[in-house]
Amino acid sequence: MKIIAIDFDGCLVESQWPLIGRPREEVFKAALAEKAQGSALILWTCRTGKYLDDAVEFCRAHGLEFDAVNDNLPETVAAYGGSNCRKIVADEYWDDCAKLIPDLLYNLLTLPQAAAMLADLFGDECACNVCGIDEWLPGQCVHTFDGTCPDPEGEHECWRQFLEYYQQRKKTPRALSDADCDRLIEIANDISRTRLFRYVDKHGQEIEAGMKIRIGNDPPALVYACCTQEMDEDLGINASNEDYLKHHPDAERVYYSLINFPSGIIEIVKEDT
């Protein structure tokens, strides 16, 4: 059974502490989907007392029930001989402050760029040589197993597979130190700002304002030109209630930035479909 610890403010809802912000529907959908597949969910938040009760009730009103709240599961405690540590034991931690390298690289960069960054960071070493069989099994690499990494075209195919492997598992590779992660984030953010948040879909086609895209199994959504809080140009989809906007002409439309969605689940919708 997979255990997922989920933060509240800034993750399940927009951060407006001590109030409760608007729900982040994509996170609720993801949590409910995990629940339906048998995952155990733990609400993992700094809220206490009435504020915690309000958060639990808010999630319940949106159809999300937790198996534990700021506590380990009983079976986890039993597995550790009755010891209930302060840290919540989980397979995944969903938090707006979390640092998830593969998703970050996929959102901000094209796959070849991300792979080239890792190859450059490790001096063009093969992912198999850097990470070893404990983390990245050579049997899953297209290259030879004798310690060499033939890559005549310079496409860093081994690193590409490595990133894809970890993106699917939503984990940060252990081979990347905190300093490595910070450097990759810095480079990725610099590139994204230079390119004014250039996004591509799962086929590598560039996304532009005015297009329609499908995210996962959701209905097609119109892409808008918008801005980040730092006033950098960005692209996003609508996050506002259309009826509310209709009856409140002075209200501003709110957007979900495309940076929140891995390019692997985004597809441009052709006009004739």
Image: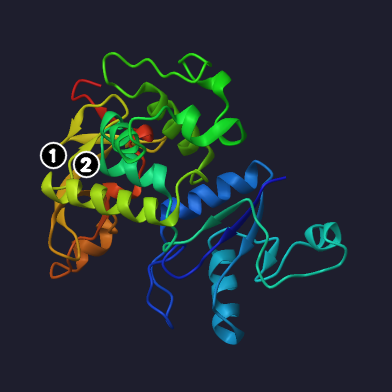
Residue in view at x 19 percent, y 47 percent: 192
Q: How many marks?
A: 2
Q: Amino acid at mark 1?
A: Gly
The spot of residue 106 in percent (x, y) is 33, 39
Are the two marked residues, 1 and 2, in contact with CB atoms closer than 8 angstroms?
yes
* In the depicted structure, whether residue 38 falls above or below residue 217: below
Q: Report the quarter where the N terminus lies.
A: top right
Apparent side of residue 141 relative to residue 123 in the rendered image (left or right): right
Percent x, y of residue 232: 13, 58
Residue at the (59%, 46%) spot, across then down:
34
Which corner quadrant of the image does residue 71 belong to?
bottom right
**How packed is label 2: few (under 14 Cα within 10 Å), some, or many (20 or more)?**
some
Q: Which quadrant of the figure has residue 81?
A: bottom right
Pick whichever, 60 or 52, lies toward us: 52
Q: Which residue is mark 2?
A: 222
Distance of label 1 from label 2 (alpha carbons): 6 Å
Residue 240 in the image, given as x and y percentages of width and height: 27, 59
Report which quarter residue 87 is drawn in. bottom right
Please state which of residues 107 and 181 is positioned toward the viewer in this rendering.
181
Q: Which mark is residue 210?
A: 1
Please identify the quadrant where the C terminus is shown.
top left
Q: Which mark is residue 241?
A: none
Q: Secondary structure at mark 1?
A: loop
As displayed, is residue 186 above or below residue 47? above
The percent position of residue 131, horizontal first and vertical second, equals 51, 36
